[in-house]
Amino acid sequence: MARSVPPFPGFNAGGAAEPFELSWELFGELCRVLALRVAREYQPELVVGIAKAGVLPAAIIASILRVDFFCMKISRRSGDALVRSQPEVFGTAPPQVAGRRVLLVDELTTSGDTLRLALAAVRDVGPAEVRTATTFARTYGYHPDFFALENDAMIVFPWDRQVLQEGELVTHPVYREVLG
């Protein structure tokens, strides 16, 4: 059964009608909350962020937890364009995960396709244990081990709200209609 692919990260065609505009300040607080939730139940030795957007919360969480940070790229996109229906792993998981407790972080999960691929890639390297965390999770679909906030709205991330077009920052074309 083919799944519908969102046109942009954070987009949720079947979710709440109003978009959820995430400020940088709230993003920072959600990362802090997520780091605290992780620390209460798990002591990772390193954090792996899923590029592109998952590296943002991952780096912050790694800093708060005072552990090493690494990244790996998994995407459906090339640049800003959606080019594949299923995510693809580019490269391998960091070899530093071998024998260590790992926290795998992304900014959002809906279907879980990206996190499942990342989990498989990390497990291929032989960590002692691996758990997952996302800033946002949907009320349906895949749930990571840890998340900061459950939300079904279209999430407008602060790093995606504006893009460079002809030398000027403008509202991202995907958000123009919903943000006005």
Image: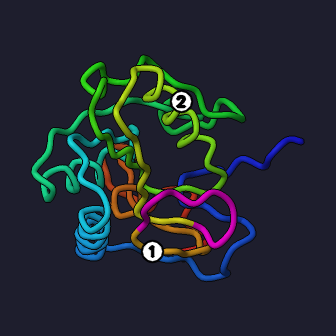
Q: Amino acid at mark 2?
A: Ala
* Residue at figure coordinates x 68%, y 30% from the top left: 84
Instruction: Indicate left or right for 36 with 110 as reference.
Output: left
Q: Residue furthest left?
A: 66
Q: Position of residue 175 (x, y in %)?
A: 54, 64
Instruction: Indicate left or right for 87 with 46 as reference.
Output: right
* Residue at figure coordinates x 71%, y 47% from the top left: 5
- Graded by Cα atoms within 10 Å as few (under 14), some (14 to 19) or many (20 or more), the crowding at tag 1 reads some
- Of residues 171 and 155, the one drawn nearer to the viewer in this rendering: 155
User: Residue 139 in magenta?
Assistant: yes
Q: Quadrant of residue 11?
A: bottom right
- All told, the count of numbered labels is 2
- Graded by Cα atoms within 10 Å as few (under 14), some (14 to 19) or many (20 or more), the crowding at tag 2 reads few
Residue pointed to by mark 1: 149
* Residue at figure coordinates x 58%, y 69% from the top left: 154
Q: Is residue 94 above or below residue 141?
A: above
Q: Quadrant of the N terminus?
A: top right
Q: How is the image coloured?
A: rainbow
Residue pointed to by mark 2: 120
User: Residue 58 in magenta?
Assistant: no
Q: Position of residue 37 (x, y in %)?
A: 31, 69
Q: Position of residue 83 (x, y in %)?
A: 65, 30
Front: mark 2 or 1: 2
Q: Is residue 134 above or below residue 123?
A: below
- Of residues 166 and 38, the one drawn nearer to the viewer in this rendering: 38
Please provide the residue range marked out in magenta: 138-147
Instruction: Indicate left or right for 12 with 28 as reference.
Output: right
For marks 2 and 1, the one nearer the N-term is 2
Q: Quadrant of the C terminus?
A: bottom right
* Residue at figure coordinates x 72%, y 35% from the top left: 85
